[in-house]
Amino acid sequence: MSLIMLAFLTPTSKQDSLDVQLKPIPTDATYKAGETEYDDGGMGPLNNFARSFINTSLPEFPTNFIQDLVDNFSFPDSLLAILKKFAGFIAAIVVGFLFVLIVPIVGCCFCCCRLCGNCGGKRQQEVTDGMHCTRRIFSAVLFGCTVFILVGNICTYVSNDRMTTALDKINDIVVNNLDDMNTFVDLVVKQMEIIGEENMNITRDAIVEIMDAAKMADQMSKFVLNELSGGAIDDMSAHTKEIIAAFDKLINETEQLDKAVSSLSIPPGTTNPFTAIKQNFPKSKIDNFKKNDTISQVKGNLVDKINGTIFNAMASARLNTVEAFKQMGNQTATMLSKIKDFQSNTKGSLNIASIKADVNTYADTAKTYDAYRQKGGLALSAMTTLIVVFLVLGVVFGTVGQGLRTPPTDRGCVSNSGGNLLMAGVAFIFIFSWLLMLLTMLCYILGGPMERFFCQSLADPELKLVKVMEKKWLSEDVKTAVGGSVTDVLQGCRDGKSAYLAFNLKTRFNISEIDEQLKAQKKNIDDQLNKTLANVANATGGMNDFDKTANASFTDLKTAFAAVQADELDKAIAAAQQIPIFGGIDLSGFKDATQNLKRVNASLQEWETKFVDGMKTASSQIQAKMPELVKDFQTKVMNIADNYVNSTKDKVINDVGKCTPVWNLYHSIVVVALCQYTIDSFNGFWFSIGWCLFFFMPSLVFGVKLAKHFRRMNPDDDEEGLHMGSLVPNKVAPAPDHHN
């Protein structure tokens, strides 16, 4: 109660003592997987291009289609409807299949025709005016196509290497997530300890302190004496010290004067004016006042009366209230222990060290097989590189070795080598392109749906694929273990919700029921306070005689002043000044002490009036203020209990066990490691090969045509036609060249 009075009724009081500051729970932790970010290594444009191609050829995730297929094991749509949905995907596969089938046939026919001197196989060339311009255009187009092929070829190497890098990323990400789960569980245990133990102790100690009867009585008496009386006790205590100082000074000066007079040889017959003062000086009355200090006794008697009233009334109430709050804390601790046990069981079921060892074992095994995959990818990339090398060298050699005025039959070795290199590049296109297309088609059949239906659906904010999977295959035991829908759990953890909300823990224990139990204990506390404080208020109502005590306290003081007889002191000083023998005595100190005492005596009535009026005000106000004090005290005690209960409920519902690591586990492993690092790299690889195949076709055509402009032609039997061949158009009928 005293603390409440100081908080609400005295502006200068210390309110900090009433602010029960509960210890905040730690809500943030450094999660390794939370920092996992996808690094595309500069391959973002390629991945986006491949994803755009896949999205164009495949429809969005067919949720209803898959759901009906899973539920009924039948196709809900007609075959024609299915073909329409997947028309782009089917068309891409058909084109790839036709490419694989037709290119070897075309290559075989092309080779046979060349051997027969057709399809540009004849080593004669008609010279025209636009021949050089045509050669430059063909060279530029072929060089441009080769550059595009080279870009795609570089991407195949990078994507092939990133698939190997993905294994290391997956291993690190899984290990980091396991560490995060351990950190998460430890954080929850720490949160439980703070809420259920440390904050409970803080609240209990605050209740114990505020219900301390001795402190309440002491602070209440100070409040009554200082606040309700307007500070009359403190003021009068200061005046009392001033009165005592005046008396002490007079006594001291009187003693000094007595010594000075005793040292004089007073002639017979001379009257000593100080004899009467010495004989009648009321030192005993002054000492009696100083010893008893009746003003202080007023304060002491009042404090004793308040102590007796409050202490007896509050002693038993304190025990009952603290016990009720202890039961409240026990019920809260029971609720929290269930959450703590739930988290402890979860931690106990995770053998982090064993799982890490298994992950490392699987990663090592995967790396062993990945070495073969990497070599296969390098071999496929090398095929494209070989074609690029032949085409680039062919264009360079042919361009460098070509002369503007050189007849086709006189072309040099360098130019002729360039033409042969171009034909070699064309030959390797026919040899390798069907195989590259076959592998690209198979990878597309696997990687396209994985990206479109698996990765994009798992990364979708609505988690469509997870919903479909859990609806059909998720057992009731799993649903009970995770608290309901996996989708809801993942979305809740993604949003940083607490374990109570994300895992739907209200199905395990209803916090509302516990809240009702806590309310019952709070009502018990409230009833105890109502009964006890009513007794305090009634008992304090009899404290209305402070002014009578104050009046009585001035009796001894007035008696002491009356005994001093200040007028007689003045007469003695005046008489002494008329006798020569006393002229050598210094009376200034005695005169000052006398004047000071007279001044104090003149103020005594005013001081007495203020003191009595202040105590009278305290007597009248204590009955009026007591209900307010009681209400404030009761409110504060209940606020302490409410603060703990509400804080505990709020933290349990909103802060304890924020399951971000669960979302990180899903997102970093499934979305980042599997989809972004692995699937993106895989799709980037086959898309890069497909990119090269696309530019193989124009390169093949222009390579064949340009080779005719670089290779050395066979001379005609007609010598005149030979010499004129490079200057004017010349129709010749050369023999077939069976060397190419």
Image: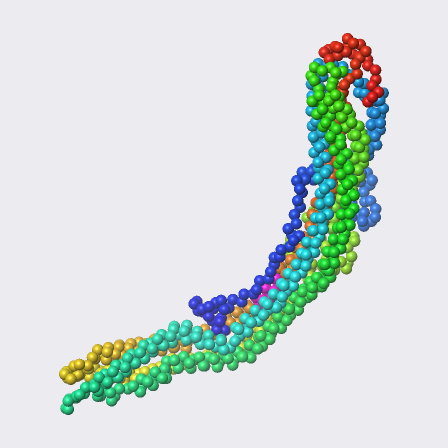
Judged left or right of residue 255, residue 66 is right
* Dominant secondary-structure state across the stretch colored magenta: helix
Write down the quadrant of residue 684 in the picture: top right
User: Does residue 338 belong to the magenta stretch?
Assistant: no
Q: Position of residue 98 (x, y in %)?
A: 82, 32
Q: Position of residue 364 (x, y in %)?
A: 76, 50
Q: Where is residue 494 in the image (x, y as percent from the top left)?
A: 66, 52
Query: Which quarter of the rendering shows the C terminus?
Result: top right
Q: Which residue is found at the position 21% from the left and 87% from the top?
A: 262
**Can you name the residue that lies furthest to the bottom here?**
268
Q: Which residue is found at the position 46% from the left and 70% from the top?
A: 6
Give the answer, above or below, for where 49 lies relative to 344: above
Q: Which residue is found at the position 80% from the left and 39% from the top?
A: 442
**Residue 726 showing in the rendered view:** yes
Write down the quadrant of residue 280 in the picture: bottom left
Write down the quadrant of residue 393 in the picture: top right
Of 634 and 438, which appears nearest the observer? 438
Q: Position of residue 588 (x, y in %)?
A: 21, 78
**What residue range appears in magenta?**
641-651
Q: Which residue is found at the position 81% from the left and 50% from the top?
A: 71
Total marks shown come to 0
Of 730 and 564, which appears nearest the observer? 730
**Residue 491 showing in the rendered view:** no
Of 300 and 719, which appears nearest the observer? 719
Give the answer, above or below, for where 571 lies relative to 154: below
